[in-house]
């Protein structure tokens, strides 16, 4: 479990990261890269809308997927950020969005970024640089200017969490959720902070909510599995590790964790044939993964098939 606990310290911040100069254009939304049910990119998902911002005036809503901006396809948050960064405020943009399976066309007039938004971006810049005290300062300035902005609390919570101040992080993530109850990333990161405080039931509850909002979040399945394993709920943990791998089969970490824990589970029960049956799936999925051959070799060793065990260990060495 040490490797899993170490991985839990990795925080994924889904924001548009670039320097915002004074008088910059502003949309007034928080976004994340959208995914289809198959896990493929499907536009930019709006996860929060400033009620006084340009997007609210254009009729954009939480859950909308931005597909085209002035005829340009946007697939990632950074591609959207680049478009907005290159045009002045007061520019009118035509947006094509996907809302509940239907395409909607709307016009959005960009505005000047408000001061609290600039503080938020400065806070994220400091988070990325590892200057967490300075980041907390900027996010606090943003909160003082607009205490109803969920992103300010989420950002400060992330800075606190990076510092290891998990109680403060949980408090800020909770405030972000109170403002925007559909913020999956706030639930996810509060779950991480609760795990760090050994509050496993609350962590699982938060991962559940994050997955309810975004069922394609492989990291949420992975970390829920780690939490369940910590509680001794091995069957459910293995199921979560498997789901994370199914969503993102190109991530070797998910494969290795899933196979490792499933083998350990069957070996603990003395079901070595079942351990081998599950272990032999791994080389088919990831034939270049050394660890999967080590696991398979270990399983063969346990039932006395030493030649096959040695063959797998040699493959791992290669």
Image (tube, rainbow, N blue to C red):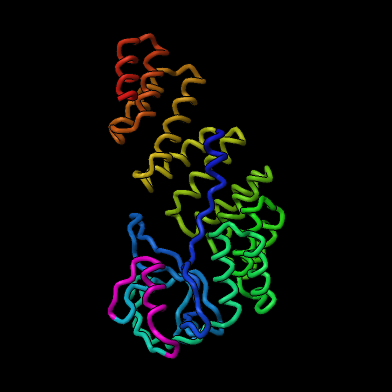
Q: Is residue 252 magenta?
A: no
Depth check, front residue: 70 or 106: 70
**Residue found 56% across the figure and 76% down from its top:** 118
Q: Position of residue 315 (x, y in %)?
A: 30, 23
- Asked whether, in this view, residue 6 is left or right of residue 42, the answer is right
Q: Is residue 35 above or below residue 317?
A: below
Q: Is residue 22 above or below residue 166?
A: below
**Residue found 38% across the figure and 89% down from its top:** 92
- Asked whether, in this view, residue 253 is left or right of residue 131, the answer is left
User: Could one spot residue 312 in this view of the protein?
Assistant: yes
Q: Position of residue 316 (x, y in %)?
A: 34, 25
What's the magenta region? Answer: 71-90
Q: Position of residue 23 (x, y in %)?
A: 51, 85
Q: Classify residue 71 by image quadrant.
A: bottom left
Q: Quadrant of the N terminus?
A: top right
Q: Quadrant of the C terminus?
A: top left
Check the image and name the residue furthest to the bottom: 90
User: Could one spot residue 177 in this view of the protein?
Assistant: no
- Asked whether, in this view, residue 253 is left or right of residue 200, the answer is left
Depth check, front residue: 188 or 318: 318
- Asked whether, in this view, residue 185 is left or right of residue 248, the answer is right
**Residue found 47% across the figure and 76% down from its top:** 61
């Amino acid at each position: 479990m040490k490797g899993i606990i170490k991985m839990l310290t990795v925080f994924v911040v889904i924001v548009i990261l670039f320097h915002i100069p004074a008088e910059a254009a502003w949309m007034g939304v928080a976004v994340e890269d959208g995914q289809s049910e198959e896990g493929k990119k499907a536009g930019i998902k709006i996860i929060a809308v400033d009620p006084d911002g340009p997007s609210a005036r254009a009729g954009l809503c939480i859950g909308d997927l931005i597909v085209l901006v002035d005829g340009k396809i946007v697939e990632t948050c950074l591609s959207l950020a680049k478009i907005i960064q290159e045009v002045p405020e007061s520019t009118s943009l035509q947006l094509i969005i996907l809302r509940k399976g239907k395409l909607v066309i709307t016009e959005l007039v960009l505005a000047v970024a408000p001061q609290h938004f600039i503080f938020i971006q400065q806070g994220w810049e400091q988070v990325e640089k590892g200057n967490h005290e300075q980041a907390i300062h900027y996010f606090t300035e943003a909160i003082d200017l607009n205490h109803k902005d969920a992103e300010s609390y989420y950002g400060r919570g992330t800075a606190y969490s990076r510092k290891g101040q998990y109680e403060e992080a949980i408090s800020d993530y909770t405030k972000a959720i109170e403002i925007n109850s559909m913020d999956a990333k706030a639930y996810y990161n509060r779950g991480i902070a609760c795990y760090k405080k050994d509050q496993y039931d609350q962590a699982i509850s938060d991962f559940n909510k994050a997955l309810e909002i975004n069922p394609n979040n492989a990291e949420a399945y992975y970390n829920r599995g780690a939490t369940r394993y910590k509680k001794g709920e091995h069957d459910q943990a293995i199921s979560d590790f498997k789901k994370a791998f199914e969503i993102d089969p190109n991530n070797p970490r998910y494969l290795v964790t899933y196979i490792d824990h499933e083998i350990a589970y069957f070996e603990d029960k003395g079901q070595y044939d079942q351990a081998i049956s599950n272990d032999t799936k791994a080389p088919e999925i990831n034939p270049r993964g050394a660890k999967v051959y080590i696991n398979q070799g270990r399983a063969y060793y346990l039932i006395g098939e030493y030649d096959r065990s040695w063959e797998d260990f040699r493959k791992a060495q290669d």
